[in-house]
Image: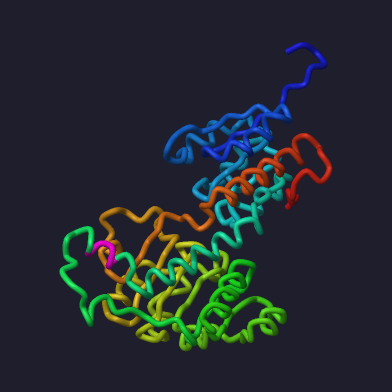
Amino acid sequence: MPKGVEMAPQVFVSRRIPKVGLDLLLAKGLKVDLWQGDIPPSYDVMMERCQRVDGIISMLSDRMDRKFIHRCPNLKVIANFAVGLDNIDLEAAHEAKIAVGNTPGVLTEATADLAVSLLLASARNVVPGCHAGLQGRWQCWEPLGYLGLDLQGKTLGILGMGRIGEAVARRCAGGWNMRIIYTSRNSKPKVERDLGAQRVLLDQLFQESDFLSIHTDLNSETKGLLDRNAFEKMKPNALIVNTARGAIINTNHLLESIRNQRVWGAALDVTDPEPLPHDHPLWKEPRVLITPHIGSATYTTRDQMAVMAAEHLIAKLCQVPNAGRTTAL
């Protein structure tokens, strides 16, 4: 390279993302290495591809631990294409002076819509009913067929009253006059005022919820939080909805509790492990509905996430003031 000529910053994008985000990176002169595979790169492959890059747009499936970060000495910024950051060793990133950003806010409404969709579909046995028709088992109208749960006036428990939890509560309180109870690190006066929500202790949340919607982040305190002990405190007709992180629920204990009729059922957009193996017995439970982590999967939302992730890299690598929301940890 001729003396005085600077090489364009290099970035690795670990999955195909909406074109609008890639176009932003290219327009700023960044050199983009885009992973084209249908499945994510392995830990070793990604580490090899990222050893000389300046920035990464990563997915939740990409584990970036201390070893990974130490093997990437040029790395200046990581933009996680998600709200959560539990796939990144934030302490190691801080020590290496790597800025880490995510994509909060833009996926709130889409994820809340999906949570309510799962709640409705599960409560009213929509998928088993569809399967009966497709498989030729629908012979006639049945007075006792596919009986489900009512929503009107029931109690919705929100585990983690953040943006998405509040959006779900707003839909359910307004649409079905549901009583809202919640747990959160801090009280939410606006939610309490607008929706009549009540902040409760965790045991009360488990004991009183007809529907429990999970919206907390994954950390050492919430991993496996919904275990056998939690399920034993719930109503036998309780329906659990999880659009947060799969590992918040102990999968084996959930299966056991549904089979033993300790809880009515579950609707999961996230699982542990993820994806759930196709031969896992949870797939065969008629009162379990599983979707492939599609909470933010709308055209508009994914475009906005791609733009935000690209702006994180641009703000750090191109030194453009206010070009993103990248946070130096």
220 to 260, vertically: above or below: above
The residue closer to the viewer here, 307 or 1, is 307
The residue closer to the viewer here, 136 or 107, is 136
Using the rendered image of the protein, determine whether residue 311 is visible from the camera's viewpoint: yes
Residue 305 percent coordinates (x, y): 62, 48
Residue under the image location 31 percent in, 71 percent down: 287
Residue under the image location 49 percent in, 48 percent down: 61
> Is residue 316 shown in magenta?
no
The magenta region covers 128-132
Residue 137 percent coordinates (x, y): 17, 65
Q: How is the image coloured?
A: rainbow
In the rendered view of the protein, which quadrant contains the N terminus? top right
Type of secondary structure dominating the magenta stretch: helix
Figure quadrant of residue 311: top right
177 to 272, vertically: above or below: below
Figure quadrant of residue 234: bottom left
Using the rendered image of the protein, determine whether residue 65 is visible from the camera's viewpoint: no
Residue 245 percent coordinates (x, y): 50, 62
Residue under the image location 60 percent in, 57 percent down: 107
- 287 lies left or right of 309: left
Q: How many marks?
A: 0
Q: Residue furthest top?
A: 2
The residue closer to the viewer here, 281 or 252, is 281
Q: Residue furthest front?
A: 140
Figure quadrant of residue 109: bottom right
- 261 lies left or right of 137: right
34 to 108, vertically: above or below: above
> Is residue 130 shown in magenta?
yes
Residue 78 percent coordinates (x, y): 65, 44
